[in-house]
Image (cartoon, rainbow, N blue to C red):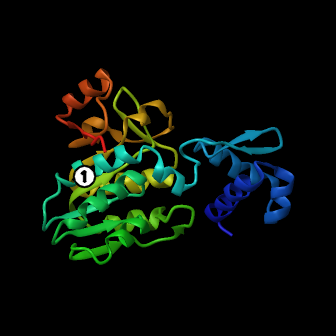
Amino acid sequence: MDAESRQDQILSQLKAKARLSVEELTAHFGVSSQTIRADLRELHGRGLLKRTHGGAVHVDTASSREYGARRMLNLRQKEAMGALAATLIPDESSVTLNIGTSTEQVARALSGHSGLMVLSNNINIINALIGTRPKELVLVGGAVRQSDGAIVGEDAVEFISRYKVDFAVIGASAMDADGAILDFDAREVSVARAILRNARTRILVCDGSKFDIAAPIRICDVAELDYVVTDRPPPEQFIARARQGQTEILVAEQSDG
């Protein structure tokens, strides 16, 4: 079993049991205690669990909630942001979207567009667009993370690098007032960077609650983006940094209904 599969299983076990020891994980997977400790260090660094003396405990953070539950967080805001971001993307263009509940809302808003070529490492996005008006759907190749339908890792990065699209749409787990756009998982960050690198116009879709989250891995700086679509005005320092890069900040208006 590779490290990624083993770590996914560790997280699944923690959701059911809340606390696990290195000893029982070593016995379950048939690997050394050093290997399990390395897994726990990585998962702790990504904010997905909390290390304890001799093991780990489950943490209930935005990065570790069940993906289905995260879809419901700030849903009205995400729908409004998705609709606004979709207005930036014309018919007959190409777009890449990454994993995330906000980018899924952008995809839903794009379902009425015609002639799009849509590339994504998010199985949920491709499934949502099957039978709609885009002319071509391309699923990034690689190993599927079963917890959320993401395709991450070096195979995904290499696949994305074969394309140059008109628009990149990414989400993120956290934003800092200084302009840093951040995430927890180095594999997801590598894919997000590849998506941005291989697009002509770069769009971040991220609700304002992400300013309250601290994540350790930098995707990019706001000044490297063309648009930030959010649900409320960001901090002044963030706006100033965006202005330096001529990045346009768009705030989605939510309906009362």
Left/right of residue 18 with respect to residue 179 in the rendered view: right
Q: Could you tell me residue 194's position as x and y percent?
A: 34, 56
Q: Nearer the viewer, residue 134 or 224?
A: 134
Q: Secondary structure at mark 1?
A: helix
Residue 67: horizontal and vertical position, in percent?
53, 56
Q: Quadrant of the C terminus?
A: top left
**Residue sitting at x 16%, y 72%:** 115
Image quadrant assignment for residue 66: bottom right
**Which of 33/236 is in front?**
236
Which residue is more in the foreground, 176 or 164? 176
Residue at x 32% of width, y 59% of height: 97
Q: Check the image and report above or below for 163 versus 12.
A: below
Q: Residue at x 20, y 28 (%)?
A: 244
How many marks are shown on the rendered structure?
A: 1
Please report the residue visible at 47 percent of the width from the left and 30 percent of the height from the top.
212
Residue 95 placed where, x, y %?
24, 62
Quadrant of the rendering where the N terminus is positioned: bottom right
**Residue 225 appears in the rendering:** no
Please, which residue is most extreme toward the front here? 257
Q: Residue 159: image x %, image y %?
A: 36, 69
Residue at the top extreme?
236
Question: Height in image: 195 above or below 117?
Answer: above
Q: In the rendered structure, which amino acid carries the disc numbered 1?
A: Ala
Left or right of 39 in this view: 24: right
171 left or right of 167? right
Mark 1, other Cα within 10 Å: few <14 / some 14–19 / many ≥20: some
> Is residue 179 at least partly visible in the picture?
yes
| Residue at which label 1 appears | 83
